[in-house]
Image (cartoon, rainbow, N blue to C red):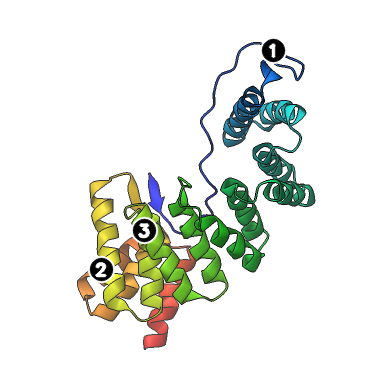
């Protein structure tokens, strides 16, 4: 079962693997035209990205090395190389690769997304926000909704809740109201005092969960619902959500926060 949670850093979806046959070298006459060279680089990067997604770093490294042999300055290959360096525990090399990819092509949005996620993990939130903000301007990027969601996360960590609400709302629009964006919207809204808005988005979240049995409440979604119900005076809804939080996640931070909440109200 998949729980509804809004606190995961998402990097752009990894590309589907393409099968290549035969031995490819930089001296092959298929590279006599630039289009053929670029196609070969793209194929190797796609294979490397697929293997990274599977956790097979050695196979990914092999294909990426082939791509870089063909085109050492390929932004796509350099960005993927940053992922491999990061998985190897080499943050300095990873950052250098991400920066080089962006310098080679400032319009290569995927490199900015990777770099933004890297910076977020390093808790360099202002720099991360700037990368996601730049990436969000690319209207042709297929995972733009995820970019806005990540932008909202960085803005939250910087204490910019009004800006985060704008980003989460845009993410919800672009993804047609995915559960993660709806949860973040309702959570921040109730935290900033917009209980009516929070209740509206939380209701949409509950509707999605009812239609998809694979989606289950997380501690975050339960506590958000409890806060909304509590401030709305819906005691039945509050009691139901509290019981779920207590029974399913008794050791969670959110359950401790709930106990602190009711303690402060006494």
Q: Which mark is residue 172?
A: 3
Which one is in front in this view, the residue at disc 3 or the one at disc 2?
Answer: 3
Q: Is residue 38 above or below residue 25?
A: below
At 47% across and 72% down in the image, what residue appears? 163
Q: Disc 1 vs disc 2: Cβ atoms closer than 8 Å?
A: no
Q: CA distance from mark 3 to mark 2?
A: 13 Å
Which one is in front in this view, the residue at disc 3 or the one at disc 1?
Answer: 1
At 44% across and 79% down in the image, what residue appears? 260
Identify the image quadrant of residue 88.
top right
Quick check: 243 left or right of 97?
A: left
Q: Which residue does the numbered mark 1 point to in the structure image?
A: 23
Task: Pick the residue in front: 208 or 149.
Answer: 149
Q: Which mark is residue 200?
A: 2
N-term-proximal mark, 3 vs 2: 3
Q: CA distance from mark 1 to mark 2?
A: 57 Å
Residue 55 percent coordinates (x, y): 61, 34
Identify the image quadrant of residue 219.
bottom left
At 23% across and 47% down in the image, what residue appears? 211
Quick check: 210 left or right of 247?
A: left
Neighbours of disc 3 within 10 Å: few (<14), some (14-19), many (20+): many
Q: Is residue 134 above or below residue 1?
A: below
At 20% across and 71% down in the image, what residue appears? 236
Quick check: 140 left or right of 31?
A: left
N-term-proximal mark, 1 vs 2: 1
Residue 196 percent coordinates (x, y): 26, 76
């Amino acid at each position: 079962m998949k729980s509804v949670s809004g606190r995961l850093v998402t990097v752009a979806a990894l590309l589907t693997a393409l099968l290549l046959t035969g031995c490819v070298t930089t001296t092959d006459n298929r590279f006599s035209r630039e289009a053929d060279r670029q196609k070969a680089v793209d194929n190797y990067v796609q294979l490397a990205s697929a293997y990274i997604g599977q956790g097979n770093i050695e196979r990914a490294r092999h294909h990426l090395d082939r791509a870089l042999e063909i085109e050492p300055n390929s932004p796509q290959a350099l960005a993927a190389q940053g992922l491999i360096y990061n998985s190897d525990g080499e943050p300095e090399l990873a950052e250098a690769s991400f920066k080089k990819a962006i310098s080679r092509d400032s319009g290569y949005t995927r490199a900015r997304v990777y770099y933004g996620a890297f910076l977020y993990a390093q808790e360099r939130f202002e720099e991360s926000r700037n990368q996601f903000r730049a990436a969000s301007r690319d209207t042709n990027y297929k995972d733009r909704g995820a970019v806005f969601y990540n932008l909202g996360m960085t803005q939250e960590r910087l204490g910019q809740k009004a800006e985060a609400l704008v980003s989460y709302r845009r993410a919800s629009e672009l993804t047609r109201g995915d559960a993660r964006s709806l949860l973040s919207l309702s959570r921040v809204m109730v935290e900033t005092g917009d209980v009516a808005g929070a209740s509206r988005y939380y209701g949409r979240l509950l509707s999605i969960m009812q239609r998809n049995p694979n989606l289950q409440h997380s501690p975050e979604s339960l506590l958000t619902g409890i806060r909304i119900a509590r401030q709305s005076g819906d005691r039945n809804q509050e009691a139901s959500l509290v019981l779920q939080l207590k029974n399913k996640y008794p050791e969670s931070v959110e359950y401790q926060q709930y106990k602190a909440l009711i303690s402060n109200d006494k």
